[in-house]
Image: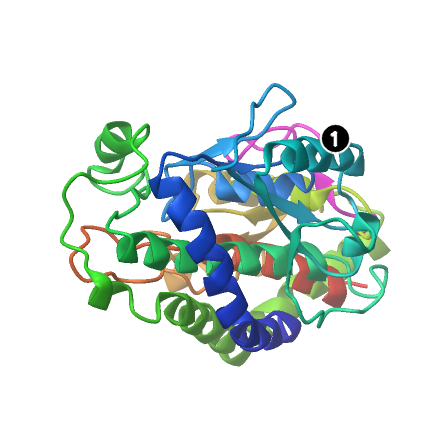
């Protein structure tokens, strides 16, 4: 968690370069180009697609995608990335003169010295071995993705177009609003002007840094309590299943560096206790907005301990029992962190970064 907080500060040193990159892409997108995201780092790709507070214009890049000189492709690289997809993408982008923007830490080494693509952060500040700090690179890439997105929104407004952004489907009117704008990259009418988007990328980093700082200050007891539950389960030979709801999961739970106890549940979160779990086992729930009252009640009845993180906190008495540990993820229920004067919703989410950071914090503490 402290590493991610440090990263938000270091991304500030990238803002001028990110702005230059976003301004170039904005001109091309306003002219009719497309914004794609590749499937190299799957958690990165899914974080960018259909995301509350994210851009409606983002599309999935595939081998059938026909690129043009006005297109931009976003790429995330970490130690688990499918690099077999990378070189064909780079070759096709070079031929079409499309822009490729890569977010990576040490894994950028697969690009070679003359890749001809933009790589962020320009000043490599994450150089720890992956096995020493798994998750650091993948989550840091998410911070870069949303900071660049903020810069792109600003640059598009300067070009005279306000990008369309999603609202959480769980918020009032969210589903209807998203259906309206899902295939519309820009608004035809908007109250957003250049003053509204001033320092937008810095404001996003402020919001994320504030949430991480609050978590570092207020949640250590909950983290230690959850980590003890996980350590006791390992010592007792019990099972730990990880339930999830969110774009980056389950891919953030798979691959190198994941703890042996971390077994991704077969389905996303619902009110059903996984059949594999029995008395003494643990269910770690990386939830989303609403606290799972029915699920935690059912787990309690079966004497299965749970560790839960959701934006909506439970009543204090609900987690007074030793069987439930609640970790506050410190993001608001609308799942977007920045208010934009003249726009009808908050934009730019922090929940993906926070939920992944919570998982990796528990993984470190439970060793």
Residue beneath disc 1: 88
Q: Is residue 168 above or below residue 227?
A: above
Q: Give the quarter of the figure containing the N terminus.
A: bottom right
In the picture, measured across the screen, residue 98 lies left or right of residue 262, that is left
- The residue lying toward the viewer, choosing from 263 and 166, is 166
Label 1: state its secondary structure: helix
Residue 304: x, y in percent? 63, 45
Relative height, residue 112 to residue 246 (above, below): below
Residue stretch in magenta: 259-278
Quarter residue 185 falls in: top left
Quarter placement of the C terminus: bottom right
Viewer-side residue, 348 vs 221: 348
Neighbour class for label 1 at 10 Å: few (<14), some, many (≥20)? few
User: Position of 171 compared to 282: left or right?
Assistant: left
Corner quadrant of residue 248: top right
Q: Is residue 66 above or below residue 263?
A: above
Q: Where is residue 156 in the image (x, y as percent from the top left)?
A: 33, 52
Q: Is residue 71 above or below residue 109?
A: above
């Amino acid at each position: 968690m402290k590493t991610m907080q440090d990263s938000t500060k270091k991304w500030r040193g990238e803002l001028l370069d990110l702005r230059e990159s976003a301004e170039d892409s904005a001109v091309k997108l306003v002219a009719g180009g497309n914004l794609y995201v590749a499937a190299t780092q799957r958690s990165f790709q899914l974080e960018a697609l259909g995301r509350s507070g994210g851009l409606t214009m983002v599309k999935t890049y595939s081998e059938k995608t026909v690129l043009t000189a006005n297109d931009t492709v976003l790429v995330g690289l970490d130690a688990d990335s499918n690099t077999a997809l990378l070189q064909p993408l780079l070759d096709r982008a070079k031929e079409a003169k499309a822009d490729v923007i890569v977010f990576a830490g040490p894994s950028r080494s697969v690009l070679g010295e003359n890749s001809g693509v933009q790589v962020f952060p320009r000043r490599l500040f994450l150089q720890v071995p992956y096995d020493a700090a798994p998750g650091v690179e993948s989550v840091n890439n998410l911070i870069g993705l949303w900071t660049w997105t903020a810069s792109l929104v600003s640059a598009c407004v300067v070009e005279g177009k306000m990008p369309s952004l999603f609202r959480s489907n769980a918020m009032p009117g969210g589903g209807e609003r998203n259906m309206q704008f899902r295939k519309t990259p820009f608004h035809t009418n908007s109250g957003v002007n250049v003053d509204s988007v001033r320092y937008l990328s810095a404001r996003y980093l402020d919001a994320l840094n504030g949430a991480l700082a609050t978590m570092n200050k207020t949640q250590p007891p909950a983290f230690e309590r959850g980590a003890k539950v996980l350590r006791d389960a390992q010592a007792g030979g019990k099972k730990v299943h990880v339930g999830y709801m969110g774009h980056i999961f389950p891919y953030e739970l798979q691959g190198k560096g994941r703890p042996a106890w971390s077994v991704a549940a077969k389905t996303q979160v619902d009110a059903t206790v996984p059949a594999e779990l029995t008395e003494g086992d643990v269910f770690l729930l990386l939830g989303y907005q609403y606290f799972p009252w029915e699920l935690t009640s059912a787990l309690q009845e079966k004497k299965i301990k749970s560790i839960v993180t959701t934006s909506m906190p439970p009543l204090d008495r609900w987690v007074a029992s030793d069987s439930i540990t609640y970790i506050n993820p410190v993001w608001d229920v609308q799942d977007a962190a920045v208010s934009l004067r003249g726009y009808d919703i908050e934009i730019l989410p922090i929940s993906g970064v926070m939920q992944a950071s919570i998982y990796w914090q528990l993984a470190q503490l439970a060793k």
